[in-house]
Image (spheres, helix red, strand yellow):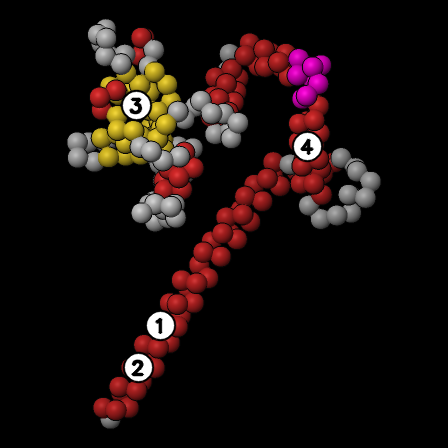
Amino acid sequence: MKPKKMHVKKTVSSIGSYFLNGLIALAPLLITFWFFSFLFDVVKALLAPLKTISVPLLGSLPHHEVIVGVIIIFLAGIFLKSLVVRSLMELIDVLFYQVPLVRPVYNGIKQLIYAFSPSNKESFQRVVLIEYPRKGLYSLGFQTHKAAEQLRPDTSNTQWYTIFIPVTPNPTHGFFIIVQESEIVPLKITTEDAMTIIISGGIVQPKHFN
């Protein structure tokens, strides 16, 4: 009986091992597929009004509203090179800033998108380590600017900086803190490297790291 039980136990163990190996191999693919599928559904929901636009040769295609949306964005990028269109967008900005309830929402979203734009080289000036949320614990953060006098806790000549500390796995959320220059530990890594580490929770690190 013992050899038979050992054989059954070994077989069950092998089946479990095969299943675990398959799960580990397929999980990244499945999660990635789910993420982009979810993102695609969100985009489709946002672009649903474009279904009413009848475009020759596109109306019969599945998800044609997404194609129409991409075309509109592409054309907007071209037209924004025009002084007339750019002036019109600036006028729309001015109008939005005049509406009390709309102004803070519109301005906040615009600044956030601009901060994460690849063309913006000033929002995240450098990657730093900050002793946060308590002594002995360090967090990755981005130095964004020198703190204005109105934001400083004292009137001394000490230099204070504004720091954005993103959270894992969504770096668009985080904490805004103001710290002294002496409490900032600058790191010699790029913003892209820091984002990779933050989004993955430290699991994935750039290959050029030792």
Task: Measure the alpha-carbon separation of dots 4 and 1.
Answer: 49 Å
State the residue at coordinates (51%, 15%).
Answer: 103
Image coordinates of residue 52 in percent, x first then y, are 74, 36
The quadrant where residue 98 appears: top right
Circle on res. 74: 4
Whether the magenta-drawn stretch holds residue 141 is answered as no
Residue lying at the far right in this picture: please name it. Answer: 56
The quadrant where residue 152 appears: top left
| Residue 80 appears in view | yes
Circle on res. 177: 3
Side of 70 where 118 appears, left or right? left
The reply to whether callout 3 and callout 1 are in contact (CB within 8 Å) is no
Circle on res. 10: 2
Front residue of 99/116: it is 116
What is the magenta range? 80-87
State the residue at coordinates (44%, 59%).
Answer: 27
Q: Amino acid at mark 3?
A: Ile
Front residue of 41/140: it is 140
Image coordinates of residue 7 in percent, x first then y, are 30, 87
Chain-order first, disc 3 or disc 4: 4
Please tell me whether mark 3 sits on a helix, a strand or a loop: strand
Task: Measure the alpha-carbon separation of dots 3 and 1.
Answer: 47 Å
